[in-house]
């Protein structure tokens, strides 16, 4: 018994690599857990017709083999239960496992299991991952799977080493209770799976929903004044007004339907409705001017705002071959999620945060493609490096007059690098174009009005572009955007995020009102830095802090205009608390100091209490 314990302890490091997946995968992977017991140095297996005592087959009425067969059959798994997993990859040569070196202490053991019994599989990326931990139950699962392999060999009259059978018999005796209990557990699981299959929403479609209630409000002496700096001095584009301080109760509901046709593709259809009013300036005349600046907008506001139901996302994702993902967005393109999802090591960071603001929600460069229809692709070179690119057309691309290519558009390219599981970096480039009108927003409606429309703005009357209210509009403008973003989980409970970005805008037509010539240029700049405290006062809870300078015009190539001399500061704090697995609350606030990059504007405060229900 002492030798068995010693040998079991010796094989534990080998067992550790087998259980990074769910139980069925773990059962298959743990075949290797008994590697040293079954494949310590032994005589070479001889053909079954050889007279050597080191081998036998069931045709030779061997009491040891018969006893082991009976023992296996007493504790065997239920009929029809399979331990293989389609996501695992069978290997025929130990050298196919990229992370198993010939110098590894268990190399010969693995080699023997593969060549003699086929009692091991690898992950799809051809790794074995030999440093994972496992429980006694998981060890029993792997032992059970290997016993079934040996049982099959014996029944098929295949020669097996007597010494291996002796060792397997001893292990089976030690784990007899766990092996017997596994049959009951599997029966229970099969019963539950059958029930779920009979009562599931759909055989191909999953339903996910989020209903959110918001209590929020604004505070400050007055709304922000929006100015533009000309060669003749400061010109006011939108004067200050009384700020609306009443607390609001708002809601939004998202129903997401995700369908897979092949197992490697997905069709997402998201339905969205809300009665939200953005805490910012008027958006193209469709919403009221609450604070006078888009620097104060919260993260959750998205159209439609009038209780109507709309398709927020209609996206099909598929993989034409390994490591390449393709996204076709008919509605609601969100490149930040598409190009990063396949490479992010931690879902809420790099460069995402749990920010409550539009400015901090993610790198503002992604707003150039947000909600546009388009197509993108992401290629994953390895676990550390990926490259993505895409083209997104006009918001009204269903209209034959503008079409997909003839209106506003944005082309994106992104390089993502994750050197470790806790550090990620992104370099992003976007080339954007917006035709003349209220849709010109170089800063993605996260900076000042001047940063959004750096070649001058004029307020157009209702109905000019289908806008129900007056809206700021500008000349046709293109821009080259570039940002660097990062996320670093320095400790399990601490993460840092941030980005720094530039946009180089170009006037695509003249604007005589501001002495702007076609071809003039302007540069805008932003940065932000965030800190997240993970599992703060409980598992799954997150506290967050963020500070930054929203976009401002830092250089101006037009002879009639000048850069902004003042700088706005954005500061926010929030805490997301999980009441349970389905309900969370998030109180938070943000303050914008010198909003609209104007030192004469008083600070604007926004507070919120958000409650989300997941179902």
Image (cartoon, rainbow, N blue to C red):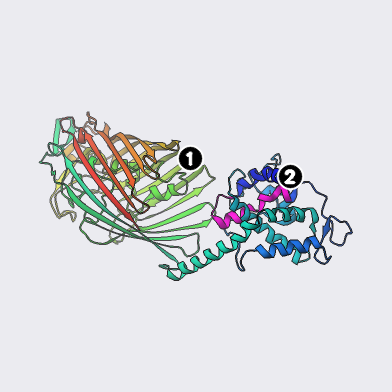
**In this view, which residue lies farthest toward the left?**
242
Magenta span: predominant SS is helix
The part of the chain drawn in magenta is 19-37
- 581 over 240 or under it: above or below: below
Structural distance between the alpha carbons of marks 1 and 2: 48 Å
Q: Which class describes the residues within 10 Å of circle 2: few (<14), some (14-19), or many (20+)?
A: few
Report x, y in % for residue 65: 78, 61
User: Which of the pair 4/615 is nearer the observer?
Assistant: 4
In this picture, residue 401 sits left or right of residue 536 = left
Q: Is residue 477 visible?
A: yes
> Residue 225 occupies which quadrant of the picture?
top left
Which numbered disc covers residue 3?
Answer: 2
Above or below residue 151? Residue 369 is: above
Is residue 121 visible in the rendered image? The answer is no
In this rendering, the label closer to the viewer, 1 or 2: 2
Q: Residue at 26% across / 50% down in the picture? A: 301
Picture quadrant where residue 426 is located: top left
Disc 1 crowd rating (10 Å Cα; few below 14, some 14-19, many 20+) is: many
Residue 17 shown in magenta: no
Query: Label 1: which residue?
Result: 417
Q: Position of residue 256 (x, y in %)?
A: 36, 60
């Amino acid at each position: 018994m002492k030798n068995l314990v010693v040998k079991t302890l010796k094989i534990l490091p080998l067992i550790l690599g087998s259980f990074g997946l769910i139980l069925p995968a773990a059962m298959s992977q743990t075949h290797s857990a008994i590697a040293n017991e079954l494949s310590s140095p032994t005589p070479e297996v001889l053909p079954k017709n050889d007279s050597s005592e080191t081998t036998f087959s069931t045709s030779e009425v061997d009491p040891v083999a018969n006893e082991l067969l009976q023992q296996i059959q007493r504790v065997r798994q239920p009929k029809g239960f399979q331990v293989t997993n389609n996501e695992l990859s069978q290997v025929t040569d130990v050298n196919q496992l990229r992370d198993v070196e010939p110098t590894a202490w268990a190399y010969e053991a693995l080699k023997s299991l593969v060549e003699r019994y086929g009692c091991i599989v690898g992950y799809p990326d051809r790794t074995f991952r030999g440093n994972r931990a496992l429980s006694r139950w998981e060890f029993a699962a792997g032992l059970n799977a290997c016993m079934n392999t040996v049982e099959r060999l014996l029944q098929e009259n295949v020669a097996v080493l007597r010494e291996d059978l002796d060792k397997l018999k001893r292990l089976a005796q030690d784990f007899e209770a766990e092996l017997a209990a596994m049959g009951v557990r599997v029966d229970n699981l099969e019963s539950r799976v059958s029930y779920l299959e009979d009562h599931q929403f759909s055989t191909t479609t999953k339903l996910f929903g989020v209903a959110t209630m918001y209590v929020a409000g604004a505070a400050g002496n007055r709304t922000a004044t929006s100015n533009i700096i000309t060669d003749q001095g400061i010109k006011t584009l939108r004067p200050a007004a009384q700020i609306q301080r009443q607390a609001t109760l708002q809601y939004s509901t998202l129903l997401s339907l995700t369908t897979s046709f092949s197992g490697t593709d997905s069709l997402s259809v998201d339905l969205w409705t809300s009665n939200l009013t953005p805490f910012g300036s008027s958006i193209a005349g469709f919403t009221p001017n609450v604070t006078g600046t888009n620097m104060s907008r919260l993260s959750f506001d998205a159209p439609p705002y009038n209780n109507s139901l709309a398709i927020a996302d209609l996206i099909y994702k598929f993989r034409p071959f390994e490591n390449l993902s393709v996204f076709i967005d008919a509605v609601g393109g969100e490149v930040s999620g598409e190009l990063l999802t396949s490479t992010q090591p931690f879902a809420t960071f790099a460069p995402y945060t749990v920010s409550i603001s539009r400015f901090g929600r993610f790198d503002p460069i992604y707003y150039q493609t947000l909600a546009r229809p388009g197509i993108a692709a992401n290629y994953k070179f390895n676990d550390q490096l990926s490259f993505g690119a895409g083209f997104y057309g006009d918001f009204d691309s269903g209209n034959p007059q503008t079409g997909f290519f003839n209106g506003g558009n944005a082309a994106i390219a992104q390089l993502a690098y994750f050197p470790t599981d806790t550090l990620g970096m992104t370099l992003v480039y976007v080339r954007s174009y917006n035709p003349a009108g209220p849709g010109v927003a170089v800063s993605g409606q996260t900076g000042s009005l001047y940063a959004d429309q750096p070649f001058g703005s004029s307020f157009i009357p209702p109905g000019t572009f289908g806008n129900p209210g007056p809206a700021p509009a500008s000349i046709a403008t293109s821009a080259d955007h570039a940002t660097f973003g990062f996320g670093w989980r320095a400790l399990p409970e601490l993460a840092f995020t941030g980005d720094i970005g530039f946009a180089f805008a170009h006037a695509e037509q003249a604007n005589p009102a501001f002495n702007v010539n076609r071809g003039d240029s302007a540069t805008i700049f932003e940065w932000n830095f965030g800190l997240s405290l993970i599992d703060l006062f409980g598992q799954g809870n997150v506290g967050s802090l963020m500070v930054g300078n929203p976009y401002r015009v830092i250089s101006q190539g037009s002879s009639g205009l000048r850069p902004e001399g003042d700088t706005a500061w954005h500061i926010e704090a929030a805490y997301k608390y999980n009441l349970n697995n389905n309900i969370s609350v998030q109180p938070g606030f943000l303050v914008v100091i010198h909003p609209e990059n104007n030192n004469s504007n008083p600070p604007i405060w926004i507070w919120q209490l958000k409650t989300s229900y997941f179902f």
